[in-house]
Image (cartoon, rainbow, N blue to C red):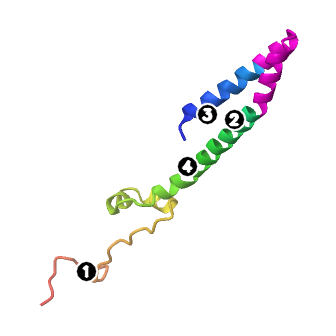
Amino acid sequence: MPHRLLVFVSGLTVGDYLLWNWSLSGNHDVLALVSGLTLPPLAVACLWLLAMSAARLIARTARRPSGRAGRSARGEREHPRRAAAAGLPLEEPPTSPTPAGSSSRKLAA
């Protein structure tokens, strides 16, 4: 839904309300009747568009964190805290099969 539609309907609603108010105070009965009859449908349409925009905004913000879950493995290695905060599993550091005191330069025969 484009935002231009919401702006357009809101502008029409405010303009119709101002015209209705002016025509009531200026004793323009026919104009007050016409603008008064068109005001409720415009107000309902404006409120509907506002509610739909708010719902789309909430849905967009609710979807945003799940879009971050598709990180690459490189991004997870570079930022382990961010990966943990996003609920992604952290990679285990590689363990060496050699005992802690022995040198890794020795080769098995």
Side (left or right) of 39 relative to 61: right
Q: Look at label 2 and name its amino acid.
A: Cys
Q: Label 4 vs label 3: CA separation?
A: 18 Å
Foreground mark, 4 or 2, reads 2
Hey, which quadrant is residue 34 in on the image? top right
Give the residue drawn at x 77%, y 29%. Answer: 39
Mark 2 element type:
helix
Of the residues under marks 1 and 2, which one precedes in the sequence? 2
Q: Label 3 vs label 2: CA separation?
A: 7 Å
- The dot on residue 60 is 4
Name the spot of residue 28 as percent of width and height, x first: 84, 12
Q: Label 4 vs label 1: CA separation?
A: 55 Å
Of the residues under marks 3 and 2, which one precedes in the sequence? 3
Which residue lies under the disc numbered 1? 102
How crowded pointer 2 is (Cα within 10 Å; few <14, some 14-19, many 20+) is rated as many
- The dot on residue 6 is 3
Asked whether the beta carbons under mark 4 and mark 2 sit within 8 Å of each other, the answer is: no
Give the residue drawn at x 32%, y 60%. Answer: 74
Q: Label 1 vs label 2: CA separation?
A: 76 Å
Of the residues under marks 4 and 2, which one precedes in the sequence? 2
Q: Look at label 4 and name its amino acid.
A: Arg
Give the residue drawn at x 53%, y 54%. Answer: 63
Q: Is the magenta stretch mostly helix, strand or loop?
A: helix
